[in-house]
Image: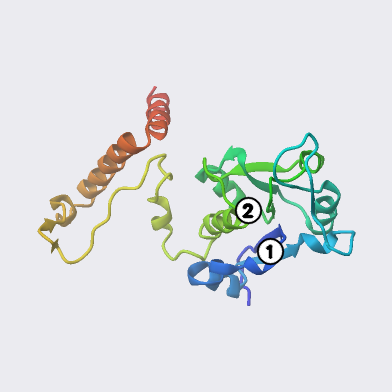
Amino acid sequence: MAVEGAAVWSATVLTIFPEMFPGPLGHSLAGRALAEGIWSLESVDIRAFARDKHRSVDDAPFGGGAGMVMRPDVVDAAIRASHRGGPLIYLTPRGRLLDQQRVRAMAAERQVTILCGRFEGVDQRVLDAHGAEEISLGDFVLSGGEPAALMLMDAVVRLLPGVVGKEESLAEESFEWGLLEYPHYTRPQEWDGRAVPEALLSGHHENIRAWRRRQAEEVTRQRRPDLWDRYVAAKKAKEG
């Protein structure tokens, strides 16, 4: 059942393992939002578009080398039958690194199609022909695009109106300020000889906000110098 007045965000996933979806996205906040019609998911089996009795989707690479490559004709047929507007995303380690800004932009779309590669990847010609946006989740390699697709959709779905209860929770998360998130504490006030920082017990909201900002800045400076440099540069540009 759709939520009245809510905009529906739709994802179509092209994969040779459609049974992997919705997977974890069928549970918790994303699963509830899926059941309520805040977003929708369609998984399309690429093998259904193969042209031989073995339903082959791959072949040996030109130029030699290990592994197999997904055929452009089969992938093209799957895209043409399934892509109904919005960006076509291909998840690959060679793509542009995904960031929160791109996730927010994707959440503003009505339709996204995600192509999950397998083997050594997808023939580049079909990616070029359809203007696929190549996106990477990080400098590591997975067995296929399906786990990455689940992560991408989770990041987008939680930004949709009505999925996360308190919008201020989203505003204070990692990367929303261009910083990593500050540390969190809850009861008991003292645990294993470790006390909650005094600043969080003061009840003074401005002091708490200032403490959290300082903590976010420090952890970003220590752990992600790349983010820190961008944050400092943006701050200087804003100030003057």
Q: Can residue 3 be spotted in the picture?
A: no
The residue most toward the top is: 240
Q: Marks 1 and 2: CB-CB under 8 Å?
A: yes
Q: Secondary structure at mark 2?
A: loop
Q: Can residue 140 be spotted in the picture?
A: yes
Residue marked by disc 1: 17
The residue most toward the bottom is: 1
Cα separation between marks 1 and 2: 10 Å
Q: Residues within 10 Å of mark 1 (few under 14, many from 20)?
A: some
Judged left or right of residue 172, residue 99 is: right
Residue marked by disc 2: 144
The mark total stands at 2
Q: Dividing the image into 4 quarters, which one contains the C terminus?
A: top left
Q: Nearer the viewer, residue 33 or 171?
A: 33
Amino acid at pointer 1? Phe
Q: Nearer the viewer, residue 230 or 1?
A: 230
